[in-house]
């Protein structure tokens, strides 16, 4: 970005606004110029064209700028001001100004839709939005009464509280640390140094001759880096002659290694992955993976690095090799075409954060909890893999009938989302759970689910009444409400493939369910068939009217 021309343009715009008696939104115009300069090769005001505005407002802004759809009107107004300014300063002629204004008129109704379309979000915007940030950049942190930055009041990703993470058992982590390829090779190098009576330099570094011999004899790619890891991780002592410390605990060594690789990555650019750009941004990348607790596709990792401007287009990039080295270092694991932190890296990062005085909570082990705590924990947003392990561990500690009795007892009178989790877990159980499930026939809210469970297993069960079928349909849709709000497009696709038919939706208003109005309103907004969607809206109106009456 050429900051000079943008600064000059904004200064001239302010002066023009004062002279013309206009209140100009200089900050929004600056953002337009900044993004035009960064991504569209606009190097001066005269480079703006109608196509520039269309690309900015329908492509660049939706990808880069975290802004609510209703903010589109402010951006369009700023763009119109910019056109007026370009015309007044003779950067463009009257015909060009008319074409630009026509483009803005056409773009105006489309921009809010584009800003709301999550499929258009770039990597940084997607990640930061998932963290709950309101903006990508903050001018400063709100101050507390004592004048210190109030990080809890700030919405930026770096100040967002860390989510609770699930840690693997300590014994498992310690055993895994012993098998990290990087630490294994560092130990080999330290033992080789000791066996050959080789001493490091006065500063404790590996001698050049020793590094050459280690490369040949041990077949390690970067002996100097490995030696640095061995020293920093406490695997070797350098007082006098080098001595291998066989007593260094694997987790202590790993914690020091994370500090070296992640926090010290910027000081050792190129040492970890061999890709200077990624090494310099390793802390930020690991931090985001830690916060999100989900694998991130490699294409999005590349896009993120592009967006934050960490490399030039002509640089020779090899992300596959960089990922291979992250795996070698024990920081990441590759899942198909996605990147995720290893359980060991999660543990090490949390230790790093705690050492920095940052609150980094640990999620409880739900496998040992009672049924209400299990359901509450699963509702709190446990990552899918951890949730699966929790459920399996919880069930292993109980008989099928005991598990079903606990789960159904925990959700008696509970909201639909809690009941849905209980029903979903009970659905995993075999016929051994029959006594407890049959007992749920006495509970009006659980009875339809219990009948369905028994009948699908070929066990004796009463028939579902028409009212019970309707009630269960509403109840299961109520379970989907949170997910539908997070991803309305996926919900609409699911409903198109397997949603209730129109004649069922038309009768749902009769169901005495606390969520029936919300469910019908959601169907009215989401169903792709306009006739069925209209039927859902009519049913929602009837349900509201019945509730009022």
Image: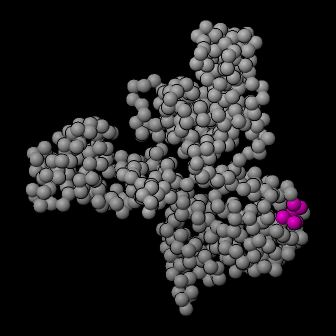
Q: Is residue 297 visible?
A: no
Q: Quadrant of the C terminus?
A: bottom right
Check residue 396 for magenta coloring: no
- Counting the numbered discs, the total is 0
Q: Residue at x 47, y 30 (%)?
A: 277
- Residue that extends furthest to the bottom in the rendered view of this protein: 549
Check residue 401 for magenta coloring: yes
Is 217 situated above or below 343?
above
- Position of 67 with respect to 92 (left or right) is right
Dominant secondary-structure state across the stretch colored magenta? helix
Query: 524 and 40: which one is in front?
Result: 40
- Residue that extends furthest to the front in the rendered view of this protein: 240
Q: Residue 21 location, x and y as percent?
A: 12, 61
Q: Residue at x 84, y 70 (%)?
A: 405
Is 253 situated above or below 295?
above
Q: Residue 397 location, x and y as percent?
A: 86, 57
Q: Which residues are magenta?
A: 398-403
Which quarter of the figure has residue 474?
bottom right
Q: Residue 71 location, x and y as percent?
A: 34, 60
- Position of 110 with respect to 447 (left or right) is left
Q: Is residue 276 visible?
A: yes
Which quarter of the figure has residue 172?
top right
Q: Residue at x 82, y 68 (%)?
A: 406
């Amino acid at each position: 970005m050429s900051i000079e021309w943008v600064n000059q343009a904004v200064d001239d715009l302010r002066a023009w606004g004062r002279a013309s008696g206009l209140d100009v939104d200089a900050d929004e115009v600056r953002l337009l110029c900044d993004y035009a300069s960064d991504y569209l090769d606009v190097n001066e005001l005269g480079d703006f064209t109608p196509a520039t505005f269309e690309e900015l407002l329908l492509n660049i802004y939706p990808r880069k700028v975290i802004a609510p759809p209703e903010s589109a009107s402010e951006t369009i107004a700023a763009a119109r001001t910019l056109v007026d300014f370009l015309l007044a300063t003779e950067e463009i002629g009257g015909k060009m100004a008319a074409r630009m204004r026509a483009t803005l008129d056409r773009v105006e109704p489309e921009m809010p839709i584009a800003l709301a379309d999550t499929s258009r979000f770039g990597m940084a915007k997607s990640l930061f939005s998932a963290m709950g940030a309101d903006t990508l950049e903050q001018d400063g942190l709100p101050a507390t009464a004592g004048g210190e930055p109030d990080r809890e009041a700030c919405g930026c990703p770096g100040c967002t509280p860390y989510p609770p993470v699930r840690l693997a058992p300590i014994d498992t982590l310690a055993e895994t640390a012993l098998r990290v390829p990087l630490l294994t090779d560092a130990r080999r190098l330290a033992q080789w140094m000791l066996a050959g009576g080789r001493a490091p330099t006065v500063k404790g570094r590996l001698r050049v001759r020793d590094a050459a011999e280690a490369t040949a004899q041990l077949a390690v790619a970067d002996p100097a880096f490995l030696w640095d890891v061995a020293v920093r991780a406490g695997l070797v002592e350098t007082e006098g002659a080098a001595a291998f410390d066989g007593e260094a605990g694997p987790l202590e060594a790993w914690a020091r290694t994370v500090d070296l690789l992640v926090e010290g990555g910027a000081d050792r650019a190129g040492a970890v992955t061999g890709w200077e750009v990624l090494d310099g941004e390793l802390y930020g990348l690991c931090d985001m993976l830690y916060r999100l607790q989900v694998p991130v596709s490699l294409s999005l990792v590349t896009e993120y690095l592009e967006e934050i401007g960490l490399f030039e287009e002509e640089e020779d990039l090899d992300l596959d090799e960089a990922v291979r080295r992250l795996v070698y270092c024990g920081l990441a694991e590759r899942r198909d075409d996605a990147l995720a932190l290893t359980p060991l890296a999660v543990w090490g990062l949390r230790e790093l954060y705690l050492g920095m005085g940052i609150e980094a909570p640990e999620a409880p082990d739900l496998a040992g909890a009672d049924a209400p705590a299990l359901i509450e924990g699963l509702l709190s947003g446990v990552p899918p893999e951890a949730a699966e392990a929790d459920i399996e561990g919880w069930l292993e500690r109980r008989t099928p009938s005991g598990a079903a009795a606990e789960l159904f007892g925990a959700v008696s009178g509970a909201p639909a989302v809690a009941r849905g989790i209980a029903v979903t877990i009970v659905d995993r159980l075999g016929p051994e759970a029959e006594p407890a499930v049959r007992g749920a026939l006495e509970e009006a809210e659980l009875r339809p689910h219990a009948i369905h469970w028994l009948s699908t297993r070929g066990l004796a069960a009463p028939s579902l009444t028409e009212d019970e079928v309707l009630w269960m349909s509403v109840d299961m849709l109520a379970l989907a409400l949170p997910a539908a709000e997070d991803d309305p497009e996926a919900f609409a696709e699911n409903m198109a493939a397997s949603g209730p038919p129109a004649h069922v939706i038309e009768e749902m208003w009769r169901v005495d369910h606390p969520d029936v109005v919300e469910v019908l309103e959601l169907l009215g907004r989401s169903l792709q068939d306009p006739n069925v969607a209209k039927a859902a809206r009519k049913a929602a109106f009837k349900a509201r009217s019945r509730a009022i009456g």
